[in-house]
Image (spheres, rainbow, N blue to C red):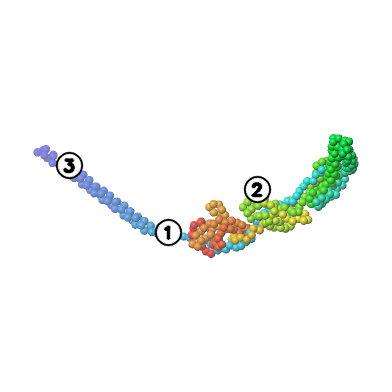
Amino acid sequence: MELKSKIGPVVAITITIAAVLWVYSGGHGITAAQHSSAESGNTTAKANDTASKSADEAPEKNSNQASLSTQKYSVQANTIHAQNIALQLAISGQTVADKTLTLTNSYKGKVVKLYVKKGDFLKKGAPILQIDTRVLQTQIAETKSLIKQRSIELKGLTKLKDINLTSNVRLAEAETNLASALSSAKSLAINLENATVTAPFSGVLNTLDIEEGQMLSDDSSIGSLVSLNPLHIQVPIPQNKIQHIHQGTLGQVHLATGLETTGEVSYISRQANPESRTINVELLVNNPNHAIPSGLTADVDFSLGQQKAQAFSPALLTLDDNGHTAVKILDEQHKVASLPVTIVKSERDKVWVLGLPDTVNLITVGQGFVAAGDTVDAHY
């Protein structure tokens, strides 16, 4: 009885504890499940809201991008037309004498007469100086007498040979003596001619290096003779322009002295200068009074004929992708194009170029902000 009375309360307490534990466990689990389910629902709702907002914003964003991609840059353009212009090639050169010769002495002796002074104009054959010929004249007289003697001897021996009173050897010796005397006379005559120095061509005695009374040896320098008519103008023509220059091409010559005249191309070199990439050309200029000296700076303008070209401000020039000088133009669809050009003439406020169509729409404002292939909003 006593054992049963003890077991009853123990069992009751155990059952009570177990019930409490079960209730606690079950309630907590349901609460966690509900909390998890709530959180899952909230996340799903947020995702749906985000997706809905993205869907609403997408059309607006695409619309803005489309608007930006279709926006055209505004430029100003001008329609220009080709005009006929006279093309010219301006080159700087210098005057060159037609002939320059250093005069030398061929017969030594004392200068007894000067016929000219420095700077005189001499015609061909005019005497310049005279060397003492007194000894030479004596030698010439002696040689003349010797020639007469040798001639008489030869005649006598010839008659004796006809009658066989002399030998062929003596006759040949007489002929040789006469020939030697004649040769000496010829040499003396040449010396006499050389004793008077004359001008070999017409020109100006530019320098005179001797004085009257001076003793001259063989090949002594006397001075220099310069011919200035016709006068030559030497100019270096760029290789890419030489095709415009021919024999007979006329050029307007402007000299440093202020004188202006016309020259005609007389010579074109067949060898280019590899350093300057130019070809030497010479023009002939009439200079009858020898008024134009050599060594002067001469600016030559060649007329290269008429050609069609366009004119505009040099500020509109640019460089294309290949580094060539170019301009930007518009086609009929207002699309930008870059065309290379060649400058043929420059003036103070404009340049003339080749390489464009006869009529072209030239971008004048905004060309630096557009590229070839762009479609722009053009205002003319």
On the picture, is 49 further left or further right than 356? left
On the picture, is 369 further left or further right than 244? left
Residue 377 seen in render: no
12 or 93: which is nearer to us? Answer: 93
Element type at marker 2? loop
198 or 160: which is nearer to us? Answer: 160
168 or 218: which is nearer to us? Answer: 168
Q: In this view, which residue lies farthest toward the front?
A: 163
- Residue 271 is marked as 2
The amino acid at mark 2 is: Gln
On the picture, is 318 further left or further right than 182? left
Are circles 1 and 2 on residues that touch, CB within 8 Å? no
Residue drawn at x 73%, y 51% is 96
- Residue 66 is marked as 1
Q: Position of residue 46 (x, y in %)?
A: 33, 54
Quarter of image, res 61: bottom left
Query: What is the distance, in whole Å, between disc 1 and disc 2 at their CAs?
Result: 64 Å
Residue drawn at x 34%, y 55% is 51
Query: What is the distance, in whole Å, between disc 3 and disc 2 at their CAs?
Result: 128 Å
The amino acid at mark 1 is: Ala
For marks 1 and 2, give the one nearer the viewer.
2
For marks 1 and 3 on the same chain, the one whose residue lies earlier in the sequence: 3
179 or 88: which is nearer to us? Answer: 179
For marks 1 and 3, give the one nearer the viewer.
1
For marks 3 and 2, give the one nearer the viewer.
2
Where is mark 3, residue-wise? 14
Query: What is the distance, in whole Å, between disc 1 and disc 3 at their CAs?
Result: 78 Å
For marks 3 and 2 on the same chain, the one whose residue lies earlier in the sequence: 3
